[in-house]
Amino acid sequence: MKFSSPIQRILRRTAAFLITAALALPALAAGTGGTAAAPMTGRRSFDALSSASELFQSEITLSLEEIKAREESDEYIPHVWPVRLGEFGYISSYYGIRIDPVTGEGSEFHYAIDLADKPNTKIHAAASGVVVEAMDYGGYGLTILIDHGNGYQSRYSHCNSMLVSEGDTVCQGQVIATMGATGRATGVHCDFRIYLNGEPIDPLTVLDEPEEG
């Protein structure tokens, strides 16, 4: 699964705004009643566009530095468990090939770990980021997808309720949903997935050692 980066969308909008503003400046100056502005020549237009381009490039550089910082920061790596294991919480299904839990027949590759617990158990964001999806995802029920801005995304499915919306910025450890059995499910649990550069990976290779209790 691949999703458009919120940073890329912001940069595109910033570029369009800067170019429009640069082209509009001479007209605005002429209408202020001050010294008359020189006619807009081809050279001046090119200079304005160049200036806007330089500003846009600086924005890209800043964003790349931010992404690099995120790659090195634990806050933006989904290593925090969405649900704490303990008296009632446990892993009910692992990443890998398994028998279809609904039909009890055949086999399928499970690209998640299932975390089971009591109904309405709080589900926490595994890392800080931006919510890119919060919707009913058919067989996965109520699902939240968070983009962490560094190639990582985390997904939380079969929720009973969602406490965040698309476009929201969330912090690592923030409660984003409650556990349920919406969609195609045999019991209350959270189907938890981690993607790296659009490809699913075993969450247990990223998550911390579990702290029970």
Image (cartoon, rainbow, N blue to C red):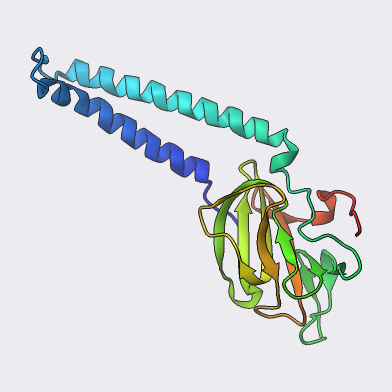
Task: Describe residue 212's horizontal placement relative to residue 175 as left or right.
Answer: right
Between 202 and 182, the one nearer to me in the picture: 182
Residue 42: name its quadrant.
top left
Instruction: Where is residue 146? Give x, y as percent.
Output: 62, 54
Instruction: Where is residue 48? Give x, y as percent.
Output: 27, 21
Q: Quadrant of the C terminus?
A: bottom right
Which residue corresponds to the image point at 82% horizontal and 64% vertical from the top-left? Answer: 95
Is 5 rendered above or below residue 29?
below
Residue 175: name its quadrant.
bottom right
Residue extending farthest to the top is: 35
Which residue corresponds to the image point at 68% horizontal and 80% vertical from the top-left? Answer: 184
Task: Describe residue 160's horizontal placement relative to residue 104 as left or right.
Answer: left
Between 52 and 29, the one nearer to me in the picture: 29
Task: Describe residue 31's horizontal placement relative to residue 184 as left or right.
Answer: left
Q: Quadrant of the N terminus?
A: bottom right
Instruction: Where is residue 3? Give x, y as percent.
Output: 55, 53
Is 212 rendered above or below residue 119?
above
Instruction: Where is residue 180? Give x, y as percent.
Output: 70, 75
User: How many numbered marks does the figure carry?
Assistant: 0
Which residue corresponds to the image point at 64% horizontal and 41% vertical from the top-left? Answer: 150
Which residue corresponds to the image point at 76% horizontal and 84% vertical from the top-left? Answer: 102
Is 100 rendered above or below residue 159?
below
